[in-house]
Amino acid sequence: MKANLNLGQVSGIKIRVHWTFFLLMAWVIFAELTQGGNTENILFNTTFILAVFLCVVLHELGHAFMANHYNIKTEKITLLPIGGMATFEKLPESPKQEILIAIAGPLINVIIAILLFFIVPVKDFIQLNFTESFDVLVRYNLQSFLFFLFIVNIGLAVFNSIPAFPMDGGRILRALLAIKIGRVKATKIASNLGLIIAVLFFLIGLLYNPFLVFIALFIFLGAFGENLMVQQIALLDGHTVEEAMLLNITTFKPQDSIDLVVNKIISGTETNFIVVEDQTIIGLLHHKTIIENSNKMVLVGEIMEVNFKTIKGTDSIKKVYQLIYNDKQELFPVMENGKLIGAIDAVNLNEYILLQSKLAF
């Protein structure tokens, strides 16, 4: 099963749904069936979930369009059962940029809520007593559908305003703190708050609602991952690709057999390779592709990846860090004056980061 289902693109931004999202849909349908729900109930709830996630997409697009204003490209938006996640090619350069990018998402939800406030209209519900409001809300009609959507957008805006990673409020807090104490320390504080909130959600989830356990896991991983990434990028500041690149690399020709590649993997430490013809790079061989085709009679040219990026030895190694973890390209050829002088991949980049972390103390 593929990890993501592609829904298309908006302004060049890929919209993807993680396969676990469909588990949420299946759970909603199953819950309705076990409670004796009819087709109308199931259709109402599944449609409502889709509407909520449309609001989530708009939320993430708010971040993306604001980031684009500062020339920060958004690679993709991934929808998960507990929300959405926009992947940027790099971090904002200044606290002001980060604040505006972070605010843009919840602001979209506030705008949607304001529109729904007048469309529903919400004031009609406020004027009703409790019994009358309950009677209206339990009906499966457009008015109750839009009212619940209004409540959800308010909830999304409030939840994302919590001042802890990975919520937008945590990014705003980090940006404000970074003005005085720097991004690394600011990230650590905002991430620690995220870890505390994750523990609280986890404990509450164990007692009352298992779904909060999944939210706690999402917050924990987001906070931990952001803190780690910022620390690693800080270690790479001022360093170039040529300091960390591999020099003695093995290349293959497109007419070479896959058996030659497999034998090289077994006898050495390299797992990804560059394909060269007439001293020109024409493709890459990734480890996963090699393993998948290791039992076939194929040539290197038949399975190599032809869409790839190259870098220069003088490039900032921070740039490569972003490329490896955003573009998912496992190996980058390093070029100088049109010639191949080395390569860099995630393995030796991580080794370089480890060495730098030791030297920093």
Image (cartoon, rainbow, N blue to C red):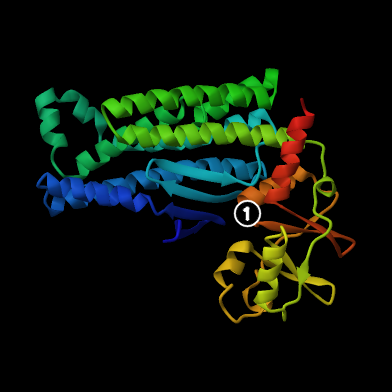
The residue at 33%/53% (across/down) is 22
Q: Quadrant of the N terminus?
A: bottom left
The residue at the point 25 percent across, 47 percent down is 27
> Seen in the image, is 197 located left or right of residue 285?
left
Q: Position of residue 59 (x, y in %)?
A: 46, 41
Which residue ends up furthest to the right in the rendered image? 337
- Where disc 1 sits, the SS reads helix
Q: Is residue 149 above or below residue 305?
A: above
**Residue at 26% across, 52% down:** 26
Residue occupying the point 25% across, 34% down: 121
Q: Is residue 227 left or right of residue 24?
A: right
Q: Choose top left, top right, bottom left or bottom right for residue 52.
A: top left
The C terminus sits in image quarter: top right
Instruction: Say if residue 80 shows up in the picture.
Output: yes
Locate residue 87 relative to residue 32 in the image: left or right. right
Count neighbours of disc 1 (C-alpha within 10 A) and say few if under 14, some if 14 to 19, many if 20 or more. some
Tell which of 285 and 309 is nearer to you: 285
Q: Is residue 110 visible?
A: no
Q: How far across and down, in percent of the image, does residue 127 sit?
A: 18, 24
Give the answer, above or below, for where 11 lies relative to 83: below
Side (left or right) of 19 relative to 172: left
Q: Residue furthest top?
A: 180
Residue tagged by mark 1? Answer: 327
What is the quadrant of residue 306 in the picture? bottom right
Q: Position of residue 358 (x, y in %)?
A: 75, 31
Front residue of this view, candidates 350 and 150: 350
Q: Amino acid at mark 1?
A: Asp
